[in-house]
Amino acid sequence: MKSSRWFLIFALFMTCSPKNNAPADPAYFQEIEQWHSQRVTALKGPSGWLNIAGLFWLKPGINTFGSGEDNDLVYPAGFAAEHAGYFLLESGKVKQVVSGDAVVTRAGLPVEELIVFHPDSVNQPLLESGSLQWFVIKRDARYGVRLRDLQSPALESFTGVDHFAIDPIWKVVAQWETTVGRTIPITNVLGQTTEQPSPGTLVFTVNGKELHLDALDEGENELFLIFGDATNAKETYGAGRYLYVSKPDASNLVIVDFNKAQNPPCAFTDFATCPLPPIQNVLIVEIKAGEKNYTHR
């Protein structure tokens, strides 16, 4: 009788758990802990999301900037000249003109007048003044100035991101189904929807359910997954999470390690333009792995 009960408990556990495709060895746990450590370092770094101090959308024509309250773009007081100059948005290009008494540099060299956004440029120039840095972004038909403060108080108060206990059962093997010429609509937090190429779909099983995630291309070697699940708005961020995985191997298999699921930038700042999970990527199961919601701001 006793052995039968334990068999029933074991069978129930196997039914309610994702398929274990990863060895439970110390090296794996060390790998995930290192990933979390690198994630914290990246968030706190110069290109991380904790130092974002503003996002200013430009109107056509002249947009003044500086620390004075009468500017169109009001920079933090004490860090920039009261009237530092202006941005000129015209014909899909943005030019920055700096006032005579303001000190703005690019790569350590003073800037007086510079094209800071051009549609033909791959990378936009980074401008600096004191602890502030900024550059221009484009989202659909909108142009904005993203501002960083490398001395942001958020950097000092940040202690890390809570995450679920590392569990190898959440490292699953997915079958890759290629799609050719397919796009899927991706909507961001601004309400903008764009069609983005989706090279394929990942098919895997969790809790006995076959699940699908449409992937986006992320350069030469990676795929980008934007997904939601039944933990959202409870243990995890309400608008879903992100996951990067390697492209399929020769057998059309992809390792999907949900222990590396991460919060989108919008969990850390109000000045991000995060893409949201497409409806088909909102999973009906709880993914109790990866980062939990960041609630300390």
Image (cartoon, grey):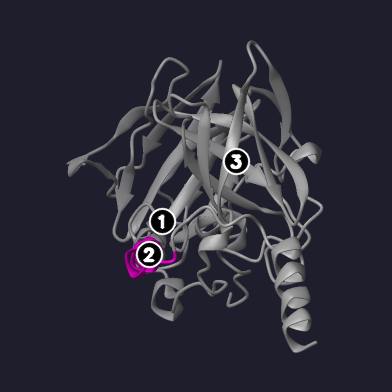
Res. 82 visible in picture: no
Question: Label 1, on which residue?
Answer: 48
Confirm or deny contact between disc 2 and disc 3 (CB under 8 A): no
Q: Which residue lies furthest to the front in this view?
A: 1
Res. 267 visible in picture: yes
Between disc 2 and disc 3, the foreground one is 3
Q: Residues within 10 Å of mark 3 (few under 14, many from 20)?
A: many
The secondary element bearing badge 2 is classed as: helix
Question: Label 3, on which residue?
Answer: 225
Marks 2 and 3, the one that precedes in the sequence:
2
Left or right, 260 with respect to 192, comes to: left
Rendered location of residue 82, percent (x, y): 43, 57
**Range of the magenta residues?**
24-35
The amino acid type of the residue labelled 2 equals Lys
Question: Label 2, on which residue?
Answer: 44
The amino acid type of the residue labelled 1 equals Gly
The amino acid type of the residue labelled 3 equals Leu
Left or right, 97 with respect to 71, comes to: left
The secondary element bearing badge 3 is classed as: strand
Rendered location of residue 108, percent (x, y): 17, 44
Q: Nearer the viewer, residue 30 or 42?
A: 30
Confirm or deny contact between disc 1 and disc 2 (CB under 8 A): yes
Rendered location of residue 70, percent (x, y): 58, 54
Asked if residue 114 is positioned above or below residue 188 in the image, the reply reads: above
Q: Which of 1 and 194 is in front in this view?
A: 1
* The magenta stretch spans residue 193: no
Q: Which residue lies furthest to the bottom in this view?
A: 2
